[in-house]
Image: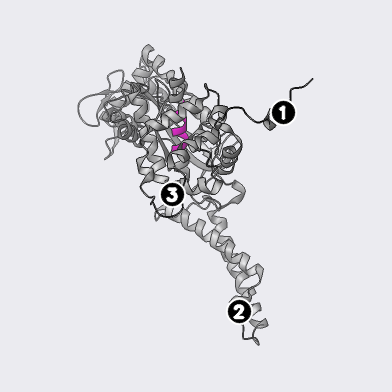
Amino acid sequence: MFRSDLTSQSQIFAFTVRDLVAEDSDTWLYVDLFDRLDLGVFYADYVSQGQPGIDPKLMVRTIFYGLAHGIVSGRKLAESCRCEVRYIVLSGEQRPDFRTFHRFVDRHHERLGALFAQVVRLAQKMGLVSLGRIAIDGSRIKGNTSKHKAMSYGRMQHTVDKIKEELATLKAQMAEENAASARDVADSLPNEIALRENRLAKIEAAKKALEEEAKGEAVDPKASKSFNDLEAMPMAKVGHEFKYGYNAQAAVDEQSQIIVAAELHDNPQDSHALPMMLDKVEETCGRSAAEVLADSGYQSDANLEAVEAKGATPYIAAARGEETVELTVAEQVVATGIPHEYLCPAGKQLPVSVRRSDGRTVVQPPDGFCAGCPFQKTCRLFQKTRTAKTITIVSEPHRQVRSSNLARLRDARGQEVYRRRKAIVEPVFGNIKSNKGMRILVKGRRKVGLWWKMAATAHNLEKIVGVMAA
């Protein structure tokens, strides 16, 4: 015997589709959560005339529920709203199609981005954000394009000239053939000419983008652009290959792994992103964190000073592999109190070669300067003179900041604090990129920036719902 198909049987008592969703489903938590959020700005553009639209609250909670469960495609979301009871309930049985979702996201771009800050502040009120310690890191996310759709600047120049010659030849041939005809030559261009003109327009647009990025300087002939997404950046990946994408930055609070800042950085390298992220944390949460953790990609004197300027304590790795380095030259030399004058560990004054305007000092110890010195085995200055003729010492304020950061990283407590970096921020990227398999389906910095904000918001909502369910 088999159980029969119950869907064809009439029900004794009336019920709604909500009765099909289990009581312990996270669907109800999302319904309650979005009732607590202020979504009034989403209603501002709507008027009472015409055909009524879908309530924005239904659209927003459906979109973010989908993101939290790995659905990034409008078509898959629309299909879920027709076939899956959780999405049917969240969307109010309106069954919006994919065009409705796309138009809604495009129409409410700024409002959806601003929702990130509101969710973070809600997490603060719930006690999920302490700002006692945050970790900042970046992840390279692949754009909706390919290296096979890219071309270098040098090749662009050669290709543009070649296509222009081909176009001139083809148009001359067409002019000869149509000389006896009253038709306009432009109206009778063959497909070959139309295809070349379209290709020429794309290449010239990519060339212009590279020239604008160079800001008046000569463009590197090896610099390349992808025609599918002119704003995507070439980024190195494993195996010395390249992919085109974006540098997604995140600042994560230690307490509940809430993302307190999520931005795109306009450079494949992380080094200049840290001040921006610190400002965004303060803007979103109303204050700065007490401790800031970051890997060696953020190591610079400017970044260390930026953290201290916020009243925070930096723990920024100084060497590749996040290992604590040995004593540096900047730590071992002794300042005399006079600008550009330093003593070596043995107490001898270092001969100055250049006094730079930025406060740095270039020293050039002569041959035999370290002869017979008892500190040769531990002196970084002596070890460096064996491979370099000159040694640059950073300015005194920078030297003190760098030395303080290195001293903290070597301290037992500092090492324990820094070991928390990976546990705080790395699982967040793993959750968004790997667990949910979320990928970019849009093009352009504006849309990708919104995608990253929405992905971070969905992550935060998932964390809040997890606490509500406990």
Q: Tell me the number on the disc at residue 185.
A: 2
Per the rendering, the mark at residue 107 is: 3
Amino acid type at mark 2:
Val
Picture residue at 62% right of the left edge, 65% below the top: 195
Circle 1 Cα neighbour tier, 10 Å, few/some/many (<14 / 14–19 / ≥20): few
Mark 3 Cα-neighbour bin, 10 Å: few <14, some 14–19, many ≥20: few
Image location of residue 163, percent across then percent down: 60, 66
Tell me where the magenta segment starts and ends, as one range. Answer: 453-462
Q: CA distance from mark 1 to mark 2?
A: 69 Å
Residue flagged by tag 3: what amino acid is it? Arg
Q: Which residue is mark 1?
A: 5
Q: Dot 3 lies on which element? A: helix
Q: Which mark is residue 252?
A: none
Q: CA distance from mark 2 to mark 3?
A: 42 Å
User: Judging from the image, what secondary structure is the residue with disc 2 in?
Assistant: helix
Q: Nearer the viewer, residue 444 or 34?
A: 34
Between residue 368 and residue 414, name the one nearer to us.
414
Q: Are marks 1 and 3 in contact (CB under 8 Å)?
A: no
Viewer-nearest residue: 342 or 278: 278
Magenta segment, prevailing SS (helix, strand or loop) = helix
Q: Is residue 114 visible from the viewing direction of this image?
A: yes
